[in-house]
Image (cartoon, rainbow, N blue to C red):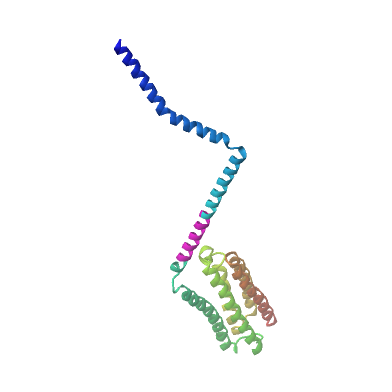
Amino acid sequence: MESVVSGLNASRDSSHLRDTIAAPADRATKSAARKHSSLSPDRIRSAMAANAAQEGLTHRVAARDDDRAAVAGGASRDPGSRKPGAGRRGLRSLAAAVSLSAALTALSFFGASSSSSSAPGKAAPATTVAIVRAGSVAAEAVLALAAWMAWAEGGLHARPAATLLPYAARLACALAWAPLVLGHGAARAGLACCAGMAAGAVACARGFGAVNPVAGDLAKPAVAWAVLLAVVNYKML
């Protein structure tokens, strides 16, 4: 009988202990439930809006920091990626292209003038020859500048059929005009050279313009000069 009584007392103590341990957790759960139930929908919405605004501000600040880092990284990479002598080499190549084209054109006129005394046909006045020589040299220099600009953009390598071949053909016609017309008196052959120069200049204006619009605009005066040279050539027939 005593063992039964002691067992009942032990079970009673253990249940009391469990109730004592579980009571704080129940009270915390109930207080949290009362707190959530005491919040009105307006307060919940305002809290959510505040959280969303704070998150948006955080994202904007982070994005701004990323942009600044990207700009700083690009600015730091640009000076290192540029070679010190790149600008000087570009100017040297430009001077070489323009001076070579102009020098070849001038030499063709001087070579033709030495043999013009024995050339058959109608001789051109010295003033006309000087004007034609100056205009041809200037036109070739400007066209060489346009070709260099297209080359700097990679157009001569990427599109040689539309840029390099028309320029080479036009330069050949321009160099052949003076020896044919002024040196040998072949005015009809000179007209053919003028037609080739005009067609080559039009092709250069289109090809260069597809690579660099400024280069295309610089090639257009060569078309007008070819037409003017054809008029002078026609008067020598």
Residue 182 position in % (x across, y down): 61, 84
Give the residue furthest to the top.
Answer: 1
Q: Quadrant of residue 123?
A: bottom right
Q: Which region is colored magenta?
A: 62-77
Please state, as top left, top right, bottom left or bottom right, where the C terminus lies in the image.
Answer: bottom right
Main secondary structure type of the part rendered in magenta: helix
Residue toward you, 144 or 66: 66
Residue 19 position in % (x across, y down): 41, 25
Please tell me which residue is depicted at 45% across the width and 65% down the height of the picture.
76
Residue 184 position in % (x across, y down): 60, 83
| Membership of 22 in magenta stretch | no
Q: How many marks?
A: 0
Please state, as top left, top right, bottom left or bottom right, where the N terminus lies in the image.
Answer: top left
Residue 179 position in % (x across, y down): 58, 82
Can residue 15 be seen from the camera position used here?
yes
**Compared with residue 54, is residue 150 higher up or lower down, i.e. above or below?**
below
Residue toward you, 53 or 92: 53
Residue toward you, 72 or 133: 72
Please tell me which residue is depicted at 50% across the width and 60% down the height of the picture.
68
Please tell me which residue is depicted at 59% across the width and 84% down the height of the picture.
183
User: In the figure, is residue 31 to the left or right of 13?
Assistant: right
User: In the figure, is residue 1 to the left or right of 65?
Assistant: left
Residue toward you, 164 or 214: 214
**Compared with residue 113, is residue 39 higher up or lower down, i.e. above or below?**
above
Can residue 185 be seen from the camera position used here?
no
Please tell me which residue is depicted at 60% across the width and 70% down the height of the picture.
214
